[in-house]
Image (spheres, rainbow, N blue to C red):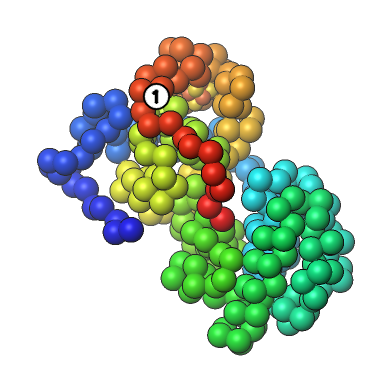
Amino acid sequence: MARKTWTSDSKDFRSPLGEDYRTLRARTLKICRALVKAYPDARIPLVFSTPHELLVATILSAQCTDLRVNEVTAVLFRKYKSVADWAAAPLGTLEKEVHSAGFFRNKAKAINESAEDILERFGGKVPSTLEELTSLRGIGRKSANVLIAHAFDGQGIIVDTHFIRLSRQMGLTGELDPVKIEFALMELLPKRHWSSFSLMRTWHGRVTCAAKKPECERCVVAASCPAAASQGDITWAAKLPQKKKGPRSR
Ligand code: SF4
């Protein structure tokens, strides 16, 4: 998918609220600054000590709680010390070991195959660019951006379920496709904010703007959020395309 670049006078730019590009960009930045200020101590909740451990934890985190992932990896990281150890692990053994994280067959395969790729093509060292990371078997853009942001201190927009929901509630995009949302936010925010904005949005989705009960009355971005007036009920967003059931991106 090609990335679309907008400018302030782009004729084909469409905001879900009808704002022009410049206004939406300013509102997005305002939301970003408020969230960064509200959660100064926010950290990625996955426990890891190397880029490869984060890669394994990120694969396991798909549709699984961080708490469960950390329980599973606490055992695994004591057993598998190097990328070579993960690549050599029998798939059946790995499947049993990650079973409690759900989708165990796909996750064990992704861990196993990505380790083989890292060993064969990158000399056992986890690569650090989006292109290289997404070239690994079993690694999608979301996982790659998690690595870039939290293992390599780079900038990446991490589009998880919280990010998709909040992007629509806040009226920043009407898209449902994670890659289109990522590209849209890349245009709306200066690159230096991409990683922190992603992390803060996830925290905000857990702490204040939970899917079932958003606490708009105490929300730090209420003044910039169109869903605040309806207590998080995204009545206006209901007119946007709705999500179809299916596998989520990794
Ligand atoms: S105002 Fe309400 S819906 Fe909007 S981000 Fe805050 S909690 Fe969520």
Decide which of 175, 53 is in the foreground and name it.
175
Q: Is residue 223 visible?
A: no
How would you rate the neighbour count of disc 1 (Cα within 10 Å): few for under 14, some for 14-19, many for 20 or more? some
Q: Residue at x 52, y 61 (%)?
A: 140
**Residue 16 sits above or below residue 129 on the image:** above
In the image, taking residue 181 as reference, residue 42 lies left or right, namely right
Q: Residue at x 60, y 86 (%)?
A: 120
Residue under pointer 1: 237
Report the amino acid beneath label 1.
Ala
Quadrant in which the C terminus is drawn: bottom right
**Residue 196 sits above or below residue 175 on the image:** below
In the image, taking residue 50 as reference, residue 118 lies left or right, namely left
Asked if disc 1 is less than 8 Å from ligand 1, the answer is no
Q: Residue at x 70, y 72 (%)?
A: 112
User: Where's residue 75, x and y in %?
Assistant: 87, 61
User: Where's residue 128, x and y in %?
Assistant: 52, 71
**Residue 158 sits above or below residue 82 on the image:** above
In the image, taking residue 47 as reference, residue 167 lies left or right, namely left
User: Where's residue 50, x and y in %?
Assistant: 69, 69
Decide which of 19, 117 is in the foreground and name it.
117
Q: Is residue 79 visible?
A: yes
User: Where's residue 229, x and y in %?
Assistant: 43, 12
Q: Residue at x 52, y 70 (%)?
A: 133
Mark 1: secondary structure: helix
Give the number of callouts.
1
Decide which of 45, 2 is in the foreground and name it.
2
User: Residue 105 appears in which quarter of the rendering?
Assistant: bottom right
Quadrant in which the N terminus is drawn: bottom left
